[in-house]
Amino acid sequence: MTAKRIGFLINPIAGMGGRVGLKGTDDALARALELGARPTAHLRAGETLIRLHGLLERQVPAVAVQWLTCSGPMGADALQAAGFTAVEVVYRGAKTTTENDTKAAVGRFLERGADLILFCGGDGTARDICAITAQEVPILGVPAGVKMYSGVFGVNPARTAEIVVGFLTGSLAPTSVDVLDLDEEKYRQGEWAVRLCASALTPYEATFTQSAKALIAASTEADVKAEIAAYLLEIIRDNPATLFLLGPGSTVRTIGDGLDIDKTLLGIDAVIDGRLTGTDLNEGRILALLDRHPRRKLVLSPIGAQGFVLGRGNLQITPEIVRRCGRANIIVVATPAKLARTPVLRFDTGEPELDAELAGAGYIPVVIGHRRRRLVKTQL
């Protein structure tokens, strides 16, 4: 049996800027470390690899895999921890890795005849890989960055493992998808500027592979957002002692406009009794507010087309914060136009048990207008 060759790499710093509110780690690693950021990509990679190892052990007929990877935290450590033994280190990265390490490693994978490149990172990592691969071999991402708008990522680590098995067994064919990237400097200044970087091949499964983020606009969107805002303003006025954490996005920002506060477009802000008490918060500042305010609600809007309520663009809202708020105190808002392109809602907090709890019985109520809600399907 001829073994399939998978090139595997981890971007060790991917996602480190999320919890500390930097909205990305590109060109901001030093600041992220100053704020107490810790690596998390290896945990996401490990979850995928452990799941994949179990799936392959049960696969009949057996599928042989030869891993091509990088030294230490860029890949080899995670593969060995997951129980894989057919591992060859073909690239040794620097102590603090950069995009040059990613590109050099991918070049080695191609030289050694990789059939698939599996990586753990975000849109920036996908962009760097595509700069080398073009559409020569398929790529697949374990979502671990702050923002992941590209179509090359599995919806979560477990589903990514299942996509790999589908590719290895021939049940999933590669499809051309868009690789997008967000200008992080503009993002930190409150401007959402996504650009198309390239096209890539990826093993595609409609329910397990995330869609590239859609830009959704309609002539009635502003009116609908105003209706949603009016309803939320009533809730805020009726709960004067409650801390409201307002998530990112234009729909939630309309609520800030109604309160006449400077709500950040892409950050997490806090409101009590209609007054702004914290802006562009990171995990630590949110937890400090929760210590002082026992009544709290979390207002979120899903990413269009992808459907992620948590886990994309709002990593400041960590599992601890979600648990302290409680599922019953999460208010999801979205316009009908967005939901028309977003068939299911997803949660990717980094803790599968919490994701399952948030998904509930398969549906979650979404505010779609003034005193109007719709039950929307959830999916893990």
Image (cartoon, rainbow, N blue to C red):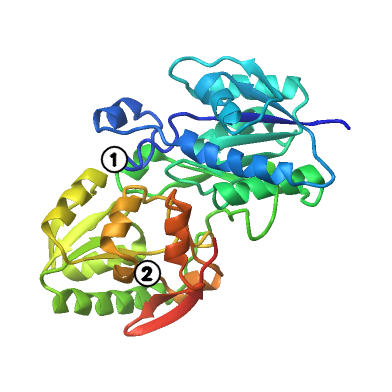
Q: Residue at x 48, y 33 (%)?
A: 42
Q: Quadrant of the C terminus?
A: bottom right
Q: Is the C-beta separation of discs 1 and 2 under 8 Å?
A: no
Q: Quadrant of residue 135?
A: top right
- In the image, is 201 to the left or to the right of 124? right
Mark 1 neighbour density, 10 Å: few (under 14) some (14–19) many (20 or more) = many
Q: Between 346 and 54, which is closer to the camera in this rendering?
A: 54
Q: Position of residue 329 (x, y in %)?
A: 29, 69
Figure check: 35 above or below 224:
above
Q: Position of residue 315 (x, y in %)?
A: 36, 48
Q: Nearer the viewer, residue 176 or 354?
A: 354
Report if residue 121 is visible in the image: no
Q: Which residue is mark 2?
A: 332
Please give the label number shown on residue 20: 1
Q: Does residue 85 show up?
A: yes
Mark 1: amino acid: Val
Query: Upstream in the sequence, badge 1 or badge 2?
Result: 1
Query: At 43% from the left edge and 47% from the top edge, which residue is drawn?
Result: 193
**Where in the figure is residue 330, as x and y percent of width and height?**
32, 67
Q: Position of residue 346 (x, y in %)?
A: 49, 61
Front residue of 271/93: it is 93
Q: Residue at x 35, y 62 (%)?
A: 250
* The quarter of the displayed image where residue 344 is located: bottom right
Q: CA distance from mark 1 to mark 2?
A: 23 Å
| Mark 2, secondary structure of its residue | strand
Numbered marks: total: 2
How packed mark 2 is, by other alpha carbons closer than 10 Å (few <14, some 14-19, many 20 or more), is some
Q: Is residue 165 above or below residue 84?
A: below
Q: Is residue 247 left or right of residue 62?
A: left
